[in-house]
Amino acid sequence: MAGVTDWSELVLDIAGDVPPGRATTYGLIAEAARARTGRGSARSVGAVMSREGGSVAWWRVVRADGSLPEQLTARAAEHYRTEGTPRRPGGSVDLTRALWDPVEDLNA
């Protein structure tokens, strides 16, 4: 990917590891990236996902409340149905049932 930094590539690699039917948060990806590189924030993960996240299952990376930016919600809904991702009324991901923690995955 032209123009992708090593850190951006790490973020995309972590996002790409989220299993179908599960979800993680921008903050947890940032935490996992920080464990490897010493830098990163949820906001910077969001920026990478916004710019370059089309190459991974972007709908599996959500806000801490399980939601996505409004403009992505309708597109994500079909993916959630297909994958059987647990959701709450209103459509956001039910993170109590669907959370995948990349930090735990690193330590496994």
Image (spheres, helix red, strand yellow):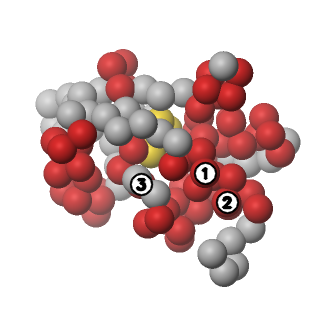
Q: Quick check: 61 above or below 52? A: above
Asked whether disc 3 touches disc 1, contact meaning CB atoms under 8 Å apart, the reply is: no
Judged from this view, the residue extending furthest toward the bottom is: 2
Q: Quick check: 54 above or below 11? A: below
Q: Distance of mark 3 from mark 2, alpha carbons?
A: 14 Å
Which residue corresponds to mark 2? 9
Asked whether disc 3 touches disc 2, contact meaning CB atoms under 8 Å apart, the reply is: no
The kind of secondary structure element at disc 3 is helix
Instruction: Identify the mark at residue 54; answer none if there is no mark.
Output: none
In the image, 78 versus 41, the foreground residue is 78
Q: Position of residue 53 (x, y in %)?
A: 49, 62
Which residue corresponds to mark 1? 13
The kind of secondary structure element at disc 2 is helix
Instruction: Identify the mark at residue 58; answer none if there is no mark.
Output: 3
Q: Quick check: 90 above or below 9? A: above
Q: Is residue 63 visible?
A: no
Q: Quadrant of residue 21?
A: top left
What residue appears at the point 74 percent right and 67 percent down from the top-left corner? 5
Q: Which mark's residue is nearer the viewer, 3 or 1?
A: 1
Identify which amino acid the numbered label 3 is placed on: Trp
How many marks the image carries: the answer is 3
Judged from this view, the residue extending furthest toward the right is: 38
Q: Is residue 82 visible?
A: yes
Circle 2: is it few (<14), some (14-19), or many (20+) Cα within 10 Å? Answer: some
Identify which amino acid the numbered label 1 is placed on: Asp
Q: Distance of mark 3 from mark 1, alpha carbons?
A: 12 Å
What residue appears at the point 18 percent right and 44 percent down from the top-left corner? 82
Question: Where the N terminus falls, by quadrant?
Answer: bottom right
Asked whether disc 2 touches disc 1, contact meaning CB atoms under 8 Å apart, the reply is: yes
